[in-house]
Amino acid sequence: MALASYLSRDDLRAAPVRLVGRRVRLELTQRLRPSLLSRERTFTYAGGALTARMPLDDSIGRALYLYDVYEWPTALTLATLARPGTTCVDVGAHVGSYAALASLAVGPAGRVLAFEPDATNRERLERHVRLNDLANVVVLDHGLADVESEVAMVRPVAANSGMTRLARSGETPDFSMGVRRLDDVLAGREAPSVSVVKIDVEGAEVAVVRGAADLIARDQPFVVFEENDPECGAHLTDTHGYRLYRITPDGYVDRASTAARRDDAMAPNVLAVPPGAELPRLPRPSQVWPRLRHDRRR
């Protein structure tokens, strides 16, 4: 049953021979020389359209290696909504796997603003920008919130470099960072209109949205966010009239439905649709990867 479920994954079915081969090599390495997993290796992902350099003992690097993408429904939602010639804002850009997809989607006339305050993650993000020659990606080294300040941060999970978050009371911070309002950042920068904002900041999403009130009113972008608590979604619906949908491998499920609430403990990713906008269709990796490869060759 487990094997059948693995082979039926949409991300795996886009390139089964190559990805199953990677799985076999990873399993052999884990059994025979596990120390090699901590070494960085260079490999392609997104159907061969992009290149990453990551260790395989990191959960995000391992997902890119094994499945060509990290959380494909969310990744392809972002790539679909980032329209050519527009700006995509990636808040909590981590190592750039989503920002790179958005870069290809918005094209040379577009822009990606990638915010990543964690120095270790940002170094890899900047490396991936150079490695893939993504000239339209701008990397910013501060966080976003609803007021300009300095905040303490922790890295709670060594095996998942994407879990960096605000320090809680009693925790020893790993580093501190400056945060600004997104509206203030955009006010001093020339960029095309914003088509989509992705926010993954481990529980501080609502502060980012509150600091982007002018942007939301002006451009009414789609918002893709990790729902660690109900505040961000409630703010978007109550203040800005957005509609919320759970992002699932089967498509978008109305956030208010029973089906969407079944596994809330997993901090689901949510698509917020602005007033009057149509709900997009979720493509499959096999539909997107060939287009990205074609765009890269042009």
Image (cartoon, grey):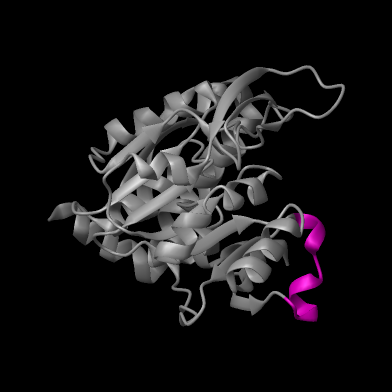
Q: Residue at x 79, y 71 (%)?
A: 261
Against 215, residue 134 (above or below) is: above
Q: Residue at x 43, y 24 (%)?
A: 123
Q: Residue at x 54, y 60 (%)?
A: 224
Q: Nearer the viewer, residue 155 or 192?
A: 192
x and y, in percent, of residue 75 in the image: 48, 57
x and y, in percent, of residue 208 in the image: 59, 47
Residue 193 is drawn in which quadrant? bottom left
Residue 255 is drawn in which quadrant? bottom right
Q: Name the magenta segment's main secondary structure.
A: helix
Q: Is residue 257 magenta?
A: yes
- In the rendered structure, the answer to whether residue 140 lies left or right of residue 260 reads left
Q: Residue at x 63, y 32 (%)?
A: 30
x and y, in percent, of residue 35 in the image: 60, 20
**Span highlighted in magenta in the image:** 256-266
Q: Nearer the viewer, residue 254 or 292?
A: 254
Quadrant the N terminus occupies: bottom right
- In the rendered structure, the answer to whether residue 63 lies left or right of residue 1 reads left
Specify whether residue 119 is in view. yes
- In the rendered structure, the answer to whether residue 262 lies left or right of residue 40 reads right
Specify whether residue 42 is in view. no
Against 31, residue 60 (above or below) is: below
